[in-house]
Image (cartoon, rainbow, N blue to C red):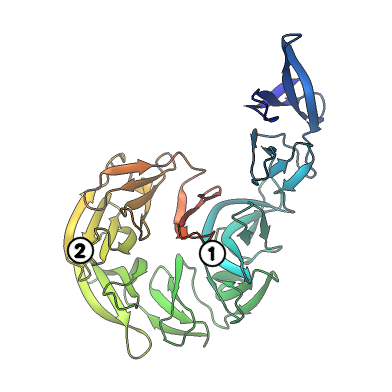
Amino acid sequence: MKPYALEVADVEGDGLDEVIFGLDPVISNLATISVYRYDAATNSLRSWATMDDRVPGQSQNSAFIRVGNVDDDDQIEYIRSAGSIIVTGLDLEVAWNGLASHFFGGPFGGGLDATIAPGEQRLVFSAIGYESQWRSETGPRILALDADTGAYSASAMNIGEDDYRAVPIQVTDYGLDGVDEVFLIKGYDDHWHYAVWDIVEDRQRWRSPTDTRQAASIRKDDVTGDGRDDFIVDLGLSISVYDLANESLVWESTNSGNDFTLGDLDADGNLELITKLYDPESRRSLMHVYGKSSEATYELRTSEIIGRSIDVDGFAVGDSDGDGEAEIFVLTHDLEVLRLDADLKELSRFTIAGIEPGRAEQVTGIYLDPPGAGRRNLILTTSAADRIIGVDPINGSLVWKSPPLMGAVTANGLRHTDIDGDGEPNLVLATEFGVYVTR
């Protein structure tokens, strides 16, 4: 026999540790997980409990074994992974199995808080579905994750036919019934359409009659002032606003878009659209701020040149220094962060430290800590050892860094969401190969 996983823990609560390990018999598929206790009389380990490590529909043995009280019931559970996550109780019977009828791979996207029933929340992600563990792609699907238990449900079918990536998504109460649906752009018959997917009923509720283009990111706000969500979409060549209630495009930017964000720059309760556009005539990069107009669309408020052909990898907006004034942080592809005021005047700039020169692709996104009693650091997502780091928003000095993650955080894949209603935001991450929720 060959051991393939090992854990040491006090499963009896008597102050003495037990040894838990998986054994592969090599010549058959009857792998087992065994618990051994120390016998002082013989000065050796003796078998205390054993369970079968086979999982229906899977061929893997457990990659790891952990022990802990995961549901606060004063009882020890065993947590193991064998293609899915499995939790068992002390009786060694399966208490919960994360195995679904299909397989998923990255990259993941989203991480949005959605209401699926009164008082019942889920974190919604997009992912790629596979026919089997051998990764034959079937297309994008929607995952709804219970952040309390780790259990999830998934769309039984693809949400698009012509796309093999985790599509950008937003959530909205499309039916005005207190239950959220997913808004997205999906590929269908070699065309792209706006669509609404029903999470609960697992079906498409609506699809736009006209074509559009692939989206890089989607955000929402009531731009038209009708009390309904409108969707601001980065279509690569431009940024557009789609009025879902009236099924119409109400605004589109000029020139080429390069990411955008929303933020209240003048504390009037309305969100402004902040973006960088490229002017081909002057060959310069322009920062634009658009505000809502009386015509229920956007109008240009401020424009400022920030350089020649600067590529922008992300924006963050907020009051970082507590003076009551919002700042705009611009992450450039040259590993610089520009700090601008609401009028797009430069306040300061710094170069991101600790990133290898010439490896700008290692910094993938910029975010600002949510408002609270503590300091607001900038959070940078990186592919350097697949980490996220916190830096001082004024001088860029390193404040903290995470352990390595399962792949780099995807575009717009970091969110702060109060998932348990305790007033403290949780950090939700969507990465190339998995998702994370902080406690």
Q: What secondary structure is marked by label 1?
A: strand
Q: Are marks 1 and 2 in contact (CB under 8 Å)?
A: no
Q: Residue 371 at what x, y percent from top left?
A: 35, 61
Residue positioned 69% across, 37% down in the render? 76
103 up-or-down from 235: above or below: above
The residue most toward the top is 42
State the residue position of label 1: 113
Amino acid of disc 2: Ile
Q: Residue 438 at what x, y percent from top left?
A: 50, 49
State the residue position of label 2: 306
Near-viewer residue (270 or 245): 270
Numbered tag placed on residue 257 in the rendering:
none
Q: CA distance from mark 1 to mark 2?
A: 35 Å
Question: Is label 1 or label 2 in front?
Answer: 1
The residue most toward the bottom is 295
Q: Is residue 287 visible?
A: yes
Closer to the chain start, of discs 1 and 2, is 1
In which image quadrant can residue 329 be found?
bottom left
257 up-or-down from 357: above or below: below
The residue most toward the front is 14
Instruction: Give the class, few, some or many, for how many residues have Cα within 10 Å of label 2's Cα (few <14, many ≥20).
Output: some
Amino acid of disc 1: Asp
Q: What secondary structure is marked by label 2?
A: strand
Near-viewer residue (67 or 132): 67
Q: Residue 38 at what x, y percent from top left?
A: 71, 17
Residue 78 relative to residue 399: left or right: right
